[in-house]
Every structure is written in structure tokens, then in C-alpha cells.
Image (tube, rainbow, N blue to C red):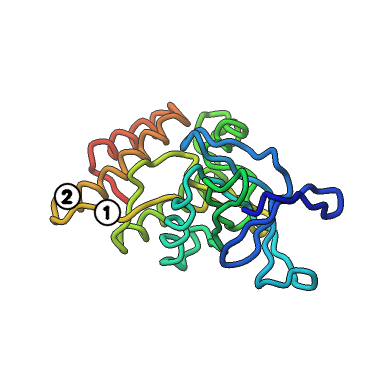
Amino acid sequence: MNADDDKSVGSALTRQVDGISQIFVKDIDGQKMNHPCSLHYYNGFIKLGNKIENLESIDVTVLGFIDTEIGKIHYDNLANFDHPGIIEAFAYGVGKGQHSNNSFLAVTKFETTFEGYLRRDGLLATDQQNRFTESFINLLRDVIVAMEELHRQGYYCAKFHGSHFAIINEGGSQRARLWRFGKIKGDTEAAISESKANDWVRLGYKIENVSLAPESKDLFKRIIDRKLQG
């Protein structure tokens, strides 16, 4: 992130990021994720190439990390996928000046995370009978198909958390997109299967926090007992 010079774009204060492309942050006051607790994300845009004056820009969300390598790690992971349940990564960069110890990742623009959705719009997840709403079921379906794709390619969500799924607006509806995951480390079939199974258990606990209706409890129990996966 080239933080040596603040530039004005319209009424927005921006900072330039060096990397595969030019990444700009519109607001220096980003939103903080609960997990990882040190991560912030910002409204931004990218412009490809070195000459930025006449190039078309793309609105993005910029993730800021406290380590110079993490942005590239996540970029490389995301670049291995072309799947509707997994967010698209456009570029990464390492900061300069006071941000020289930080890395940055530009991804598809999102307004909140799955965790933020439940905290802010939790009432939309269940109806008056405390059953899952259609909108929540659609988000949950996105999460499930994303995790299935991860498992097919040897990845998993070792530290599964609601913050690791971004909520984007697509065609007038909200959809969930996974952005944080890693390669399964086990080298035996049993270890690999265990890693995948644990993903579903972590998802089960997330579902339990949403609704206590009997059918939800039954779904949670079947997942925790590892009788239901995917």
C-alpha cells in the first residue's frame, strides 16, 4: 500500500496499493472483523496496469492484513478456484511507509460478512415460527456448495468462522462467498477425512446459534454426530 501520499478522488480520501494492479482504498476507517481480530476491510477500487489516469476502475473490497505475506497466501488460494461459492480475488499488494508491514487483497465488493449478517439481520434468518427463512437457506446453500468444492480440491476451513464468508448483493439478492481457507495438511486418508468432517461440525455449531426450533436441533444433532455432511 503506497501510503506515502493521500490523494483525493472526488470527495473520497484514497491510498494507493502497489501489487499486481493498482488498488485504492476509499475510506481509511475500515470495518473490523471479529475473526481474525486484527483484520480490517475497506471500500476500494482497482485499476489495472501502471498508468491509472484513463483506465476503467472496478469497485472492490480491500482486505488489510498485519503481515506482508498473508495477502498473497489468500490470493494464491483463491486463484485456484473458479466457483460461484468462492469469492473472486483481483490483486494483492504490500504496503509502503507506515503500512510497510501490511499486505492487502482486493476481492469482489461486499458489504458485510456472514457473521455480520447474523448479528445485524439475524431476525431475517428465522420466521415467526423460528424456522429458517428462504433468504437464510439460500446463504446456507452457498456455504455448503463452497465447502464441497473446497473438499474436492483438497482444501478446508481449519478456522471456520462467520467472518470468512462475505455477503454480496447479486441480482437483487444476498449470496454468501467464501474467502478464507487453506490446504488440508493431513497426508493420510483418515486425516484428510477428519479435516473435512470437522468443517461440517463447525458449520453445525453456526447453525445451532441461529435457531432452536426442533427441526434445527435435529439438523444440528445429525451434523455433530457426523451423520450428515454436505
Secondary element at image label 1: loop
Q: Amino acid at mark 1?
A: Ile
Task: Report the number of discs.
Answer: 2
Q: Position of residue 197 (x, y in %)?
A: 25, 46
Camera-side residue of 119 and 14? 14
At horizontal 20% and vertical 47% (from top left) the residue drawn is: 194
Which percent across, then down, holds residue 153?
31, 63
Q: Which residue is mark 1?
A: 184
Q: Is residue 150 above or below residue 138?
A: below
Query: Residue shown at 54%/59% (left/top)?
Result: 92
Specify which label sits upstream in the sequence, 2 or 1: 1
Tell me the SS state at disc 2.
Answer: helix
Place residue 120 in its image quadrant. top right
Q: Amino acid at mark 2?
A: Ala
Residue drawn at (53%, 43%), measured in percent from left and top? 136
219 left or right of 25 in image: left
Q: Is residue 130 left or right of residue 171?
A: left
- With respect to residue 85, does 214 lie above or below? above
